[in-house]
Image (cartoon, rainbow, N blue to C red):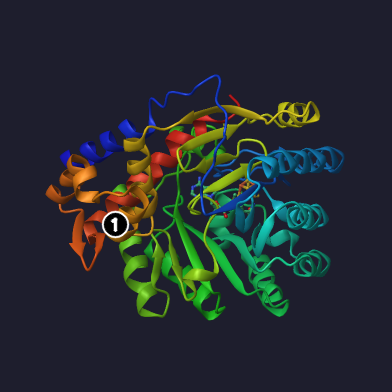
Amino acid sequence: MFSELIINRLVSRTFNNINYSPSFRIDNVNCDDLSINVRIPFCRSQCDFCLFRSNPWNPKLAKSYLQAVKEELKIYSNLFEDINVKTVYFSGGTPTLMPEGVAEILKQIEELYEFDGKSAIEANPLDLNDKTLSTLVDSGIESISIGVQSFNDEILAIVGRGHESKIAVNAIKRAKDYGFKHINIDLMFALPEQDLDDIKHDLETAIDLEVSSISTYPLILVPYSEIYDSVKGGLIKLPSIKKERSMYEMIIEFLPDVGYPMSALWRFSKDPEGYCGPFEFKDFVGVGPNAWSVIEKFFSVNTPSLTDYINSLKSGDLPILKGTVFPLRKVMKIWFLRNLYHSKVSKDEFRRKFKGEIKKELKWFLRILFIFGLLKDEEGYLKLTKKGLFYASDATKCIASKLLPGFSLT
Ligand SMILES: C[S@@+](CC[C@H](N)C(=O)[O-])C[C@H]1O[C@@H](n2cnc3c(N)ncnc32)[C@H](O)[C@@H]1O
Ligand code: SF4
């Protein structure tokens, strides 16, 4: 318990009290390569559990949105003239609601930037019909991440998912037929009424379907979700923290044994280079409402309001709500924590990036993690121990629930 308090404190000290500057600007960016995360802020309906708030699908609004995205990309292309774009990631909301728009955006990125051509998209299984899949493949999208959440129909109904598991199974099979290089699926654990057998069944179904990687997210309960009210009102019950840990333990022990080694805390992959999530790129610019950018020392977040976003770009202004330039020590800490999401941090990489020794620069921070047995020093890496993985999973939930509501509309 004491160590949990300490970890919570470390996270809060790093991510609370960010001093946003009213005159924030991004300039003199000097990174080797950059990724672009384009957020598509529409959903058919809001799922009860969801961390990401979106707008109801509206084709007319989507047209104005597309223009605004193109404008934002144009402004950034002038700021990042000599920088190579490594990956383009379309994140949700639900990008597969507007496949033609996605294709147009990708084409514009190819025209405006030096682009390596790697791209990925998040997909809702309900959208993966032949027309959408062929539009995505023809536009050059290589990887697809399908939101399955669970293969158990009762659980899908409890969390208000809006489709049965057979829709997801068929979507995965169809995506395979269309030849995507990498197919990831999102599963969730610690959902209401879920137990260890349900998780095992979900993992076995995913393995039978031979997907390239499996993301397993613990439910992050946020106050603006429908599920939050039902849990607080005693209508549904979440698994205990102890049960959630047993679920995670089962996942991290089972998947590597069947050919899916851990590539990040919550992802297990046969092909770790083939796909990574939207916030995992080293430096990335976020495009769209409520999108964040992390580019070296610069951190900023766009306005969450779709209307403000569109209006701002109509006037030729970047839609940044707030931003800050972190001092070097904070850049180091955040770099370390973000890398720790992959369960280990290379001491050499730190040395190359910051021209210093990680154990000297982050002395007290690391000492606490060593004292509590969360970190070990092995073969040039600082690696999370098994106990460390549990705490890192809790800490990541804590970071997401601290950052995301802070940027939401109300
Ligand atoms: C932005 S969503 C995009 C997926 C796509 N819109 C869909 O519905 O299939 C990405 C993933 O975040 C995960 N997610 C959403 N809300 C979450 C929450 N409250 N806690 C943990 N993971 C969550 C889900 O697994 C979801 O598939
Ligand atoms: S899970 Fe996907 S479809 Fe459901 S609300 Fe979240 S982003 Fe929208």
Q: Residue at x 78, y 65 (%)?
A: 139
Q: Residue at x 35, y 73 (%)?
A: 254
Q: Residue 325's spot in the image, x, y percent? A: 46, 31
Q: Nearer the viewer, residue 212 or 164?
A: 212
Q: Residue 156's spot in the image, x, y percent? A: 57, 56
Write down the quadrant of residue 184 in the picture: bottom right
Q: What residue type is disc 1 on? A: Leu
Quadrant of the snapshot with the N terminus:
top left
Q: Residue furthest right?
A: 60
Q: Nearer the viewer, residue 62 or 162?
A: 62
Write down the quadrant of residue 380 in the picture: bottom left
Q: Residue at x 66, y 69 (%)?
A: 142
Q: Residue 89's spot in the image, x, y percent? A: 63, 55
Q: Which residue corresponds to mark 1?
A: 389
Which element is circle 1 on? helix
Whether residue 31 is visible to the viewer of this picture, yes or no, is yes
The answer to whether 47 is drawn above or below residue 228 in the figure is below
Q: Nearer the viewer, residue 198 or 94?
A: 94
The answer to whether 401 is drawn above or below residue 178 in the figure is above
Q: Residue 206's spot in the image, x, y percent? A: 52, 73
Quadrant of the snapshot with the C terminus:
top right
The answer to whether 320 is drawn above or below residue 293 in the figure is above
